[in-house]
Amino acid sequence: MNIRRLLYVFALVLLGSVWLPLTSAQADAVGGPLAKQGSLTGAWSTEWTDGTAIYVASDPTNGPLVAVIDTSGNVWVKEGSVFGTWTEVWTAASAGGVEATAVSVASDPKNGPLIAVLADTTVYAKEGSLTAAWTTEFTGASSGPAVSVASDPTNGPLIAVLSGTNVYAKEGSLTAAWLDEYNSVTVVSVASDPTNGPLIAVVSGGSVYAKEGSLTATWLDEYTNATAVSVASDPTNGPLIAVLDATSTNVYAKEGSLTAAWLDEYNSVSGATPASAFSVASDPTNGPLIAVISGTNVYAKEGSLTGATWTAETTAAGFVSVASGATNGLVIGVIEGEG
């Protein structure tokens, strides 16, 4: 960890801040990134020796997409398999020494991979290819920001950025106009599918709000007393929302509708940050996928919120990310050796 990151994390401790959905873990969780694909009981692949973040995505055509930030602030991505070859997509030395502090990835069969990187206070994005040119998306993003992306063949790329405490979003094109979505936000998560359209969820004042179908849709008050939220969506199963309760540290989830009933999924969940402690995904074939960290152990289930059995995945982890694709099945990424 360099001095700038150390001072940043120290400042968060002094302030008692827990709001960062992506970058507190990236600044302070340094361990061995691992990933698996296809099955909850599949073999783990050691993705990197030491990393500060791992994010995964998948689609039926392009397969798994894995992104890692190394301890020098470089971003490495592989596509097609967790056992594939790495491509360095962000090099700090070539960017004037500006290190990447956050990354988010998505993928769909038509538009291909979507990668967003935060470096300093600027968000850059590329789509279609790991070697595509970067587009400067947003300047003035928070130094401890959230960036979340999604993509589907009908609606195209969806990007959300947290600047200060305001969330801005755009969809359809990397050059689309930004919309001011919500204020006083601490966490943002997005998803998208061809049938239900964009899904955005935020935590504001401890409450979770969500909207789907359009960036200008009406917000619904989803949950009170939460510290983090994670969302997914697919054309068959609809929206999937999971929240971390601030008091009980239980993860609750719902699917199929924003007005569906909440289900208590897992107890005593914690990670390097609240939002790094659980992750959700969904696809039309395999259904919902949920992963949580409890006592530094990672547990996951897929196929149903009520009937599926939890599988113990790995131990000593502080960060988890999941994805799912109809052809290749699930993808799980963790930072091991941190908890």
Image (cartoon, rainbow, N blue to C red):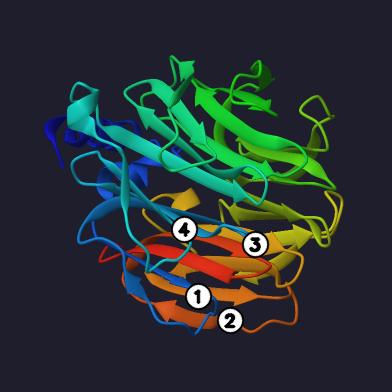
- The Cα atoms of the two marked residues, 1 and 2, are separated by 6 Å
Residue at mark 3: 60
Residue at mark 4: 277
Q: Nearer the viewer, residue 110 or 252?
A: 110
Q: Nearer the viewer, residue 316 or 155?
A: 155
Quadrant in which the C terminus is drawn: bottom left
Q: Measuring 56% from the left and 54% from the top, which residue is drawn there? A: 247
Circle 1 sits in a helix, a strand or a loop, which is it?
strand
The numbered mark at residue 310 is 2
Residue at mark 1: 299
Question: Which mark is first along the chain, 3 or 1?
Answer: 3
- The Cα atoms of the two marked residues, 4 and 1, are separated by 11 Å
| Viewer-side label of 3, 4 | 3
- Answer above or below: position of 221 versus 253: above
Q: Is residue 160 visible?
A: yes
**Residue type indicated by callout 1:** Tyr
Residue 111 figure quarter: top right
**Residue type indicated by callout 4:** Ala
